Amino acid sequence: MNQDWEDRVADAWAAFDRDEYPEERAEEFRALIDGLVAELPDDSPVGPFERACAFDSTGHSDRAVPLYREALARGLDGYRGRRARIQLASSLRNVGQPEEGVKLLTPELDAPSDELDDAVRACLALCLSGLGRDREGLSLVIEALAPHLPRYRRSMANYARALVDREA
């Protein structure tokens, strides 16, 4: 992997985000990602991660799950590793396994903070909701939203805690 490869992957995803690969061109997009992955060493954890993302983004969470797991098993870490855990949890929820998503993301609440913190909370909230634990999920969403509000930050943070802690 080098910067040229990273730039080409970023360009592919930017084209996807611009809707240059609508549903009827999903297979073409996955082939583009497969071509880029083919340039990586066979044991690279980035390859299965990028392929998982492509399947996930084109509506195939079921095919993404084993690829995310493979990427993490190969040692995917750092920013991509955190993304893989978030996206795997989301895919697990989509395939009817939200409890696995909760187990995967709960430790991420204590991970070093980064720009993915709110995504962790949002995805974890969806997994909790899938288990009928809506109050806990709502608490996480309000907790994630509170710092972005121009006012009422402290009140919203307190309300988020009160949803799960009756003594708060």
Image (cartoon, rainbow, N blue to C red):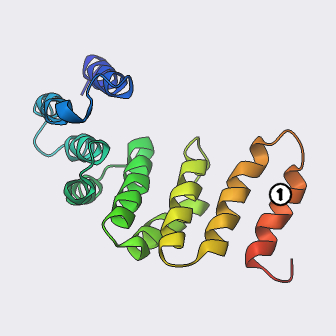
- Residue at image x 34%, y 65%? 92
Residue 20 percent location from the top left of the image: 29, 22
Residue 57 percent location from the top left of the image: 31, 42
Which of the 4 image quadrants contains residue 62? bottom left
| Numbered marks: total | 1
Question: Which SS class for mark 1?
Answer: helix
- Decide: few, some or many residues near mark 1? Use Cα within 10 Å; few <14, some 14-19, many ≥20: some
- Residue farthest to the bottom, as pictured: 167
- Left or right of 129 in this view: 9: left
Amino acid identity at mark 1: Met
- Residue at image x 39%, y 66%? 93
Q: Is residue 21 above or below residue 141?
A: above
Which of the 4 image quadrants contains residue 101? bottom left
Work out whether residue 125 or residue 115 is closer to the camera in this orientation and state it.
Answer: 125
Q: Is residue 154 above or below residue 135?
A: above
Residue 161 percent location from the top left of the image: 78, 70
Of the 4 image quadrants, the one containing the C terminus is: bottom right
Work out whether residue 64 or residue 43 is closer to the camera in this orientation and state it.
Answer: 64
- Residue farthest to the front, as pictured: 24
- Residue farthest to the top, as pictured: 4
- Residue at image x 12%, y 32%? 31
Of the 4 image quadrants, the one containing the N terminus is: top left
Instruction: Determine which residue is flagged by label 1.
Output: 156
Work out whether residue 164 or residue 3 is closer to the camera in this orientation and state it.
Answer: 164
Residue 118 percent location from the top left of the image: 60, 49
